[in-house]
Image (cartoon, grey):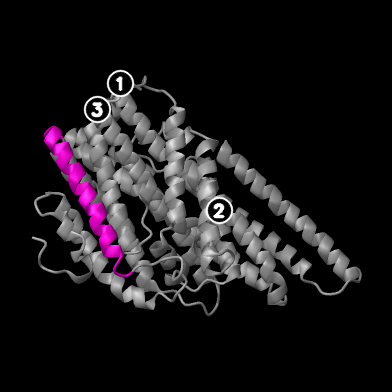
């Protein structure tokens, strides 16, 4: 009997990276959206937020692709 | 389809019943935190989860082809009666843990049932011990740890990044994030768990000579399995939702989002890399991790401990019930009938027992403390019920209602 430590380690690494990355990026998006005001900082914040959300949407699409595959 | 015998029909019906219990047992996986943080109303949450489970069932048939995953040696001679016994064992354990509000793995119940029934009917050579360790036990230990670690770190990060933000302004974002990640978990659940039932039905059809070995599941099997799990999900296993959403720790939107994302990532990463993790254990582990990640959050280790105990018991308990059922079912038609009647009696009894302290979508978000006290004896009773059913001498109709009060009428 061989325990596939490599696969186990890969699952751990991939999960940690993707979870922390996704949650981090999404949180940045949320924080960007919640910036008050309509000035330059506000617009910049919202633009950055949309980039973050787009990245998350892409990750979700990739996830659905994995499920279907 | 004209070759389907009564027994095969019975196996198919039982498989669909199992699929149904699988559905309501696992609603909590995707939706418990979503409901407890108020991101979605209970009714909408289970409705959405049901639809996504149904969609997931149609997405792929990869898992269905490898149902026993080499755990049971299919060439050793699988008979429909054995599959029937395995399913009865899995259903009984699912119902007992549901009554206790414990999120145990439906897949483990099914595997335990298959192993138990094979051990009794075929013997030890029918079970592949190596596969049991590498495909069931190691993932079972790894799943909650991986998911818990990921959500703990993610929870820390999201609180740190959002510490200066206005909670009112961010709550809408967290809500959307939670809904999206819960949807992903539901979809993954549909592809995984609905397919296990499809695989069992296909196995029974092959064993009965209805379809050729190696066939894909027929369309009507995919439709009925998807519908059964979606219906079960829609009914909502409120007892388990309450345990996961409120019992382990108090979940805030940030934690719910981190926990669901961690669960989705773990399930996708592992199934893509060939590890079949239990959705239930992944989700419960990530909720626990999210609880540990927020400073000041209370993690109820008593509830977590009972949950882990249920995980450890699932395989042997379902196996024991299925072994007893297989012993009886091997005796012939009367044996199969007896197993069917007893299984039905257990269903009725558990349902009757659940009526005493009903958990519905109306009270699913109430504090759990009251329930925790009442749950404890049922967990122990679960131990009693399983062996009590295995020899099948005592009428289980009396065994299960005695669970909360433990009246001595059982024996």
Q: Disc 1 to disc 2, how far (Cα)?
A: 38 Å
Whether residue B259 sits left or right of residue A33 in the image: it is left
Pointer 2 local density, CA inside 10 Å: few below 14, some 14–19, many at least 20: many
Residue B326 x, y percent position in the rendering: 18, 39
* Element carrying mark 2: helix
Which region of the structure is painted magenta?
B330-357
> Where does label 2 land, which residue?
B48
Check the image and report above or below for B346 versus B408.
above
Circle 3 chain:
B
Query: Residue B335: within the magenta?
Result: yes
> Where does label 1 land, which residue?
B3
User: Circles 1 and 2: CB distance less than 8 Å?
Assistant: no
Q: Disc 1 to disc 3, how far (Cα)?
A: 23 Å
* Element carrying mark 1: loop
Whether residue B322 is visible: yes
Q: Quadrant of residue B307?
A: bottom left
Towards the viewer: B127 or B343: B343
Pointer 1 local density, CA inside 10 Å: few below 14, some 14–19, many at least 20: few
Q: Which mark is residue B76?
A: 3
Q: Nearer the viewer, mark 1 or mark 3?
A: 1
Circle 2 chain:
B
Question: Which is nearer the N-term, disc 3 or disc 2?
Answer: 2
């Amino acid at each position: 009997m061989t325990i596939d430590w490599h696969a186990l380690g890969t699952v751990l690494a991939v999960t940690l990276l993707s979870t922390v990355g996704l949650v981090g990026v999404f949180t940045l998006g949320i924080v960007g959206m919640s910036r008050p005001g309509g000035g330059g900082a506000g617009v910049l914040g919202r633009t950055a937020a949309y980039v973050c959300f787009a990245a998350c949407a892409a990750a979700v699409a990739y996830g659905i692709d994995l499920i279907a595959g | 389809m004209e070759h389907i015998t009564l027994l095969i029909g019975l196996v198919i019906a039982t498989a669909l019943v199992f699929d149904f219990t699988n559905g309501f047992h696992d609603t909590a996986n995707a939706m418990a935190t979503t409901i407890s943080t108020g991101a979605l109303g209970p009714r909408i949450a289970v409705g959405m989860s049901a639809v996504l489970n149904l969609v997931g069932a149609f997405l792929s048939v990869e898992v269905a082809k490898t149902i026993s995953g080499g755990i049971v040696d299919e060439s050793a001679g699988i008979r429909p009666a054995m599959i029937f016994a395995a399913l009865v064992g899995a259903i009984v354990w699912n119902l007992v843990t549901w009554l206790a509000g414990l999120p145990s793995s439906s897949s483990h119940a099914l595997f335990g049932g298959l192993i138990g029934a094979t051990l009794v009917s075929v013997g030890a050579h029918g079970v592949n011990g190596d596969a049991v360790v590498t495909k069931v036990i190691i993932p079972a230990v790894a799943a909650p740890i991986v998911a818990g670690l990921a959500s703990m770190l993610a929870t820390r990060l999201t609180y740190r990044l959002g510490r200066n933000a206005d909670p009112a302004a961010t709550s809408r974002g967290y809500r959307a994030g939670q809904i999206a990640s819960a949807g992903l978990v539901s979809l993954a659940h549909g592809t995984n768990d609905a397919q296990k039932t499809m695989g069992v039905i296909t196995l029974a059809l092959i064993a009965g000579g209805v379809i050729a070995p190696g066939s894909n599941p027929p369309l009507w099997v995919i439709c009925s399995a998807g519908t059964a799990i979606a219906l079960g999900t829609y009914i909502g296993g409120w007892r388990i939702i309450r345990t996961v959403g409120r019992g382990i720790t108090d979940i805030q939107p940030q934690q719910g989002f981190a926990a669901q994302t961690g669960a989705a990532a773990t399930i996708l990463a592992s199934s893509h890399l060939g590890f079949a993790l239990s959705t239930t254990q992944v989700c419960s582990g990530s909720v626990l991790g999210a609880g540990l990640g927020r400073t000041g959050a209370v993690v109820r280790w008593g509830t977590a401990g009972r949950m882990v105990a249920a995980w450890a018991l699932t395989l042997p308990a379902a196996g024991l019930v299925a072994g007893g059922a297989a012993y009886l079912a091997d005796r012939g038609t009367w044996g199969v009938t007896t197993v069917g009647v007893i299984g039905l009696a257990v269903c009725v009894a558990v349902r009757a027992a659940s009526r005493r302290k009903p958990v519905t979508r109306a009270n699913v978000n109430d504090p759990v403390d009251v329930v925790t006290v009442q749950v404890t004896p049922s967990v122990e009773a679960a131990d009693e019920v399983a062996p009590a059913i295995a020899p099948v001498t005592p009428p289980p109709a009396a065994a299960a209602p005695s669970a909360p009060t433990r009246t001595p009428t059982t024996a």
